[in-house]
Amino acid sequence: MLAHLDSQCNVQDLHEQLEQIVRSLKEAATDATPAHTVEKSLLKSLLGLGQSLFKSFVRDVGPGDLGPAVALPEGRTLDRLREQSTRRLLTIFGEIEISRFVYGTREGQKIELAPTDQRLQLPEGELSYPLQEWDQMLDIEHAFGKVAQTLHRAIGLKQSVDTLEHGNRKMAEAAPRFRAEQPAPDPAAEAEILVVSEDNKGVPMVRPVQSIPAGVHRKKGEKANTKQMATIGCVYTVNPHVRTPDELIAALFRDPGREKRQAPEACQKRYWAELTRTVAGKIIRAQDQVFKQMAGEVKLRRKANQAMVHLSDGQRSLETDRARYLPTDANTVDILDLMHVLPRMWGAAHLFHAEGSDAARQFVRERLPLVLNGMTDQLIAELRQMGASHHLHGTKSSRLRRICDYLKKNLYRMKYDEYLKAGYPIATGVIEGACRHVIKDRMERAGMRWKVAGAHAMLQLRAISTNGDWEAFLESRIQQETTRLYPHRDAVKAIPWPIAA
């Protein structure tokens, strides 16, 4: 009877709130209140109404009194503790207090079962799942402080930067399992060539406290922070794009009147991002982790006799790990990113001609056909001969030697004449763009410094978002957390639920 009266009172209160909103709108119309003022006021009122409705819903579910004891499948029995326990839940409508019965072995011991929490599938912490989603959807794009200000201004919720940072790390804990359980992309949507690419990027880190003795100033040129190496990798497919060296040169130099052809789009891109870190005293190398994940993706997606292109810059460690983790067979091709060759050619040009001069431009244009026609060894010989004939010495001689050494050690993956005829991609635009978007755009803003745990979490979530898997990830995370938090859900389901209303 009391529950019925309480329910009637709740409904009456909700009707009064709604009627008050309608009266306010009519008064605003009569008083010629500006639309923007009404809009903001209405949102505040509707949030208040939502909070009241949510509280009513929780009251209707009830405190979860399943009797003096609950038998668990493994044979144990949990007793209902004397006093109801209250927990706080911060929702998108505001704060809610949930009072419910809890069960354990005895008073003062750990709570082992909270039936109401389980029925509502409440999260582990105080923030509701929708609020966590809003927080992190904004956090992966904007600074934590800005997110806190935005949500406070938009819906009146106050959250600290620490709360947002902690939520970011907690959400990222579900990322490895989600990524490991992802199925292969739709085979019907795949293109002909499978491409694997990766790159490294430094993330500005907070300088360890122990490395800054009290009262000691940094030395001249010593930076206030260090960078931790992050690795980002990508696997995608693309259709062939056959070109001639002349067509490519015209495009690179943006010749007027050149034929413009749309390049095929990369299909079903999947990114992984990791930060080198220490876990339980063991160094976890970012590059190893990314290559392992890309190797798994190749195994998942590669068709029989499909061409696999490994496209990267000249970093030796990437080639070492490529050999260690990725397949090598008659249908695999290693390609040096042309965009890492061109700066060397311009560097060589500037040893003999002024920077920005027409002569330097002509120098590169005349010699680029050697590279694109698979004759880079001839270019190396010509550069060395020019260095000798111009009597280069000192810094200029060293720079020329480094350029020639770089080209020579990469000759085996500079067969651009073959690559162009086969329609293979020869530039790492996909991974370069991802490196900028996933890492730099969020993690290298002015003044930003990261701790290892926070940086790694942010990389994980931004990679998932970039893949277009955000909603699927959130659903997977809730399922993971529900399974972990509520191991006795089958036992509770077998007991008829006492609905309060």
Image (cartoon, helix red, strand yellow):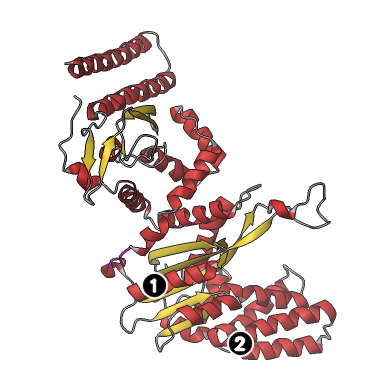
Callout 2–callout 1 Cβ contact below 8 Å: no
Indicate the position of residue 337 as horizontal and vertical percent values.
55, 75
In the foreground, 156 or 382: 156
Left or right placement of residue 350 versus residue 314 in this view: right
Q: Is 181 in the magenta?
A: no
Alpha-carbon distance for marks 2 and 1? 34 Å
Q: Which residues are magenta?
A: 182-186
Q: In this rendering, does residue 175 appear at all?
A: yes
Amino acid type of the residue that numbered disc 2 sits on in the rendered structure: Thr
Q: Is residue 281 left or right of residue 29?
A: right
Q: Nearer the viewer, residue 48 or 384?
A: 48
- Residue occupying the point 24% across, 14% down: 9
**What is the number of callouts on the image?**
2
**Mark 2, residues whose alpha carbon is within 10 Å: few (<14), some, or many (≥20)?**
many
Give left or right: position of 214 versus 330: right
Predominant secondary structure in magenta? loop
Please say whether residue 314 is visible from this viewpoint. no
Local SS, label 1: helix
Q: Quadrant of the C terminus?
A: top left
Residue at image coords 60%, 81%: 368
Residue 132 against residue 41 in the figure, above or below: below
Secondary element at tag 2: helix
Query: In the image, residue 467 lies at what x, y percent?
Result: 40, 58
Q: Which mark is residue 376?
A: 2
Q: Nearer the viewer, mark 2 or mark 1?
A: 1
Question: On the rendered structure, is 240 left or right of 16?
Answer: right
Q: In the image, which disc is placed on residue 296?
A: 1
Task: Tell me which numbered mark, 2 or 1, is placed earlier along the sequence.
Answer: 1
Q: Give the vertical position of 219 relative to 14 (above or below).
A: below
The residue shown at (21%, 34%) is 66
Q: Quarter-wise, where is residue 350 in the image?
A: bottom right
